[in-house]
């Protein structure tokens, strides 16, 4: 079974935090669109009574030292992760989120080696303070993480024992974990909002001692746009 090779050298990389602030700046046009839409829809229901669809983008920092030293987030050449899903209201200040999160990391020193993680994250989100019109509102959340990690890499193969050629290998690993969120939401209208927060994911069911990948989770700085339906 193929497993990624961890090296000991470290490389300097730009912090994902800078991408986080860029994302907030890019959300300004969405705010203008949402406010103009609200002017023609005064009867829209207040936050807490609508279900929402959301899409998010963010930076990712691995929690494990080996991954921080030897891998960098790389999705289409950008150091980002993407996520999206739905929020369903179950009370005035309580939602049930169902999130799909995708992140890909490329090895810094081994060409062609990468780890892609897709996780499905059902959970509970609770607003920690009362809602105020056009004001920030803090929330917290906890999720169960159901993850699949796909490891891809190249190795040298020989059919006759003398000449070698490159061959590709791939292996899937399944994992379980817990996620924790803390963030702020700003309502553009009664049914649209921007969420900005920190997501911490910890995977627990694939230990290295049993041939697994260890904790492939980490800290994500995300910005999400959501709208009600």
Image: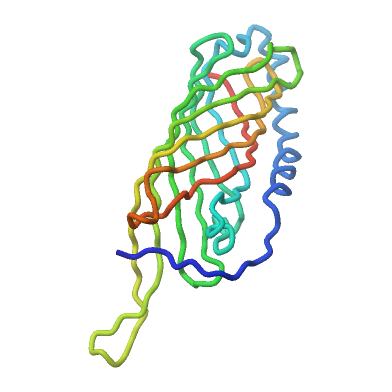
Looking at the picture, tell me which residue is in the foreground, 102 or 139: 139
Q: Nearer the viewer, residue 183 or 112?
A: 183
Is residue 12 visible in the rendered image? The answer is yes
The residue lying at 58 percent from left, 37 percent from top is: 199
- Residue positioned 35% across, 51% down in the render: 173
Q: Locate residue 91, reporting x and y percent.
A: 52, 9
User: Measured along the vertical axis of the image, is residue 16 above or below residue 25?
Assistant: below
Q: Residue furthest front?
A: 209
Is residue 36 visible to the viewer in this orientation of the structure?
A: no
Colour pattern of the rendering: rainbow
Asked if 151 appears above or below 46 in the picture, the reply is below
Task: Kindly identify the residue that appears in the image at 34 percent across and 83 percent down.
Answer: 165
Up the image or down, 124 lies above or below 1; here it is above
Left or right, 103 with reference to 174: right
- State the residue at coordinates (68%, 61%): 13
Q: Residue most toward the top?
A: 43
Asked if residue 163 lies left or right of residue 19, the reply is left
x and y, in percent, of residue 90 in the image: 49, 12
Q: Quadrant of the N terminus?
A: bottom left
């Amino acid at each position: 079974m193929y497993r990624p090779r961890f090296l000991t050298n470290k490389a300097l990389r730009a912090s994902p935090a800078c991408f986080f602030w860029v994302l907030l700046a890019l959300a300004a046009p969405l705010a203008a669109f949402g406010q103009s839409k609200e002017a023609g829809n005064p009867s829209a229901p207040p936050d807490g009574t609508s279900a929402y669809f959301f899409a998010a983008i963010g930076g990712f920092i691995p929690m494990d030292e080996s991954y921080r030293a030897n891998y960098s987030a790389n999705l289409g050449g950008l150091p980002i992760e993407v996520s999206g899903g739905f929020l369903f209201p179950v009370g005035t200040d309580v939602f049930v989120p169902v999130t799909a999160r995708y992140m890909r990391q490329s090895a810094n020193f081994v060409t062609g080696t990468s780890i892609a993680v897709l996780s499905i994250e059902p959970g509970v989100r609770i607003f920690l303070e009362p809602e105020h019109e056009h004001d920030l509102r803090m929330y917290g959340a906890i999720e169960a993480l159901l993850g699949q990690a796909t490891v891809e890499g190249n190795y040298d193969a020989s059919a006759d024992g003398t000449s070698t050629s490159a061959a590709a290998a791939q292996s899937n690993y399944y994992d379980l974990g817990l996620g924790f969120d803390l963030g702020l939401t700003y309502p553009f209208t009664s049914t649209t909002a921007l969420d900005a927060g920190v997501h911490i994911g910890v995977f627990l069911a694939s230990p290295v001692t049993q041939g697994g990948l260890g904790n492939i989770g980490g800290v994500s700085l995300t910005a999400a746009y959501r709208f009600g339906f």
